[in-house]
Amino acid sequence: MVTRTFQDITLKGDLFGGVTTAIVSLPMALAFGVASGAGAQAGLWGAILVGLFAALFGGSRTLISEPTGPMTVVMAAVLTGMIARHPENGVAIAFTVVMLAGVFQIALGALKLGKYITLMPYSVISGFMSGVGVILVILQLAPFLGQAAPPGGALGTIKALPELIRNMHFGEFLLGMMTLGVLLFMPSKYKKLIPPQLVALVVVTLISIVLFSGMDIRRIGEIPSGLPSIVWPTFSFGLISEMLVDALVLGTLGCIDTLLTAVIADSLTRNEHDSNRELIGQGIANTVSGLFGALPGAGATMGTVVNVQVGARSPLSGIVRALILLLVVLWLAPLIEPVPLAVLAGIALFVGLNILDWSFIKRAHTVSLVPTCIMYGVLLLTVFVDLIYAVGIGVFLANIITIERLSRVQEKNVKAISDADDGVPLSGEERALLDQAKGQLLFFYLSGPMIFGVSKAIARAHAAVDQYKVMVLDLSAVPMIDVTVALALENAMRDALDAGCQVFLYCPSEQAMVQLEKMQIRDWVDGEYIVSSRIEALQKGLAIVGEPMNEQVDEPMDEQVTANEELGEPQEKPSL
């Protein structure tokens, strides 16, 4: 097992990585905190707590964890929904969901299920992430236009868009446009020196103070400089099922986001992360974050890439980053108070645009129609229906289509022949034995892994088994079978025996034989009919069919002489 250690510390690179990623994280944490509805301080503390505990307990050396766009979108929906149902303690219930999501992640890691989290079709991941990006963009339209967010989430914002445009606050809209302008058009050579988000945050905030001092600009306002208060877990029995579902969505999304980012970090550093340990670390981080009323987080791609590029090679960079942000919150909070909300909306909107999978969207028309439809279907379901429905339906459809295609391919590997066929890899001796049976022996050959989709092909192949005296079932090229295929093979053998056709089974694969043993094959197939080679199966089958084995036996000389004498043939005496 790969374990994350601090043995690869490069002090200069890790310190520089911590400072740099703290600078990158600051505007993002503020933007996500406001976008979630929990406030800027929730975003800052989320960046601190998630980043610190994930670095301490996670399974990746260079991963930077913090509130991300997808996690913010889900958290905003959870927070809005819980407050609407329970105005008095909806906030506490929402952060209880965050704690449950963390516990769920810890459980996944403890059960060593990390490697299965990212086993999703790319079309589903692409559609889901793009849908999350669209939601994040839509949710920022109201603050970008200088208005309070309307109720109803993304759909509510779309419905209220005409009114939002009519009542647009020109000053805040202009500040938002300036922010987008900096993010979009800042020269690349300067982006390598300083994060454009920080430039936009500082420059546009200064412009708002100097040039818009006479206007009523909505700003972050006072941020509590002390430590956050503990939010004790709060449950509503009427919402327990909804809380569990929300925790499942939040936890699963965090797992996917984190492990995909960890893979990117591995490709940059040529190291390998421990996915199970990383999930445990993320779970601990989110549990603690929820306990202190902070936003949940996951592995952040931009922060991780920056961290690696500046030379960080150990978790020390993530710890340094968290400590720097802690200093900002405790002693420099007054410097953050004048930041306009429109600036944060512009930063979050830019993040939403970057979450969209433009590389796949641009090429969607050139790839197969099915994955394209799945991608756009998941995107629309994510935006207009529900996140968990989108992923569930997308994975179901993608897997069904994949299984159907695999089944069609595997059906070609189910062959039933009664004479030598080039499609079945038989030796010369085996072909000769099969030909001697003169069509009375059915050679049933399967190859490759057998999944449940080929069960119908197996049923079709042995449909006329009553026309034969012997059936040889060759599973020598089958590495594994599932329960459905095992049942189909059982039916094939039972049908053959019921029709008076003797069955010989050749199955050298241990895994396949174990599966058949679980079906109690020896209860209805005698051990003598489970053979150790194709040659043995064919020879025993020929013995039942009653055909000679083409074995040339030299008769003794005396017997030949006697036979010739009986026929009256003269015998030549051997010469002396």
Image (cartoon, grey):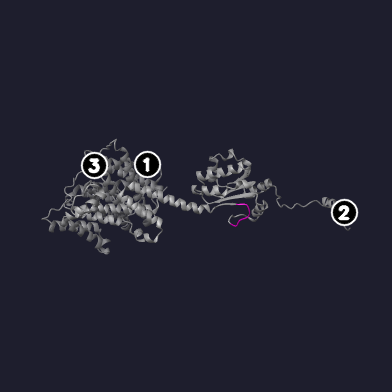
Foreground: disc 1 or disc 3: 3
Left or right for 493, reference 186: right
The image shows residue 545 at horizontal and vertical percentages of 68, 47
Q: Which residue is mark 1?
A: 107
Residue at point 31%, 55% (across, down): 355
The image shows residue 388 at horizontal and vertical percentages of 34, 46
Query: Badge 1: few (under 14), some or many (20 or more) residues near its Cα, within 10 Å?
Result: some
Tell me where the magenta segment starts and ends, as one range: 417-422
Of callouts 3 and 2, which one flags the residue occurring earlier in the amino acid sequence? Answer: 3
Left or right for 208, reference 152: left
Of callouts 1 and 3, which one flags the residue occurring earlier in the amino acid sequence? Answer: 3
The image shows residue 73 at horizontal and vertical percentages of 28, 49
Q: CA distance from mark 1 to mark 3?
A: 30 Å
Q: Amino acid at mark 3?
A: Ala
Q: Are marks 1 and 2 in contact (CB under 8 Å)?
A: no
Residue at point 37%, 46% (across, down): 277
Q: Which residue is mark 2?
A: 568
Q: CA distance from mark 1 to mark 2?
A: 93 Å
Q: Which mark is residue 84?
A: 3
Q: Amino acid at mark 2?
A: Gly
Left or right for 176, reference 319: left
Residue at point 32%, 54% (across, down): 130
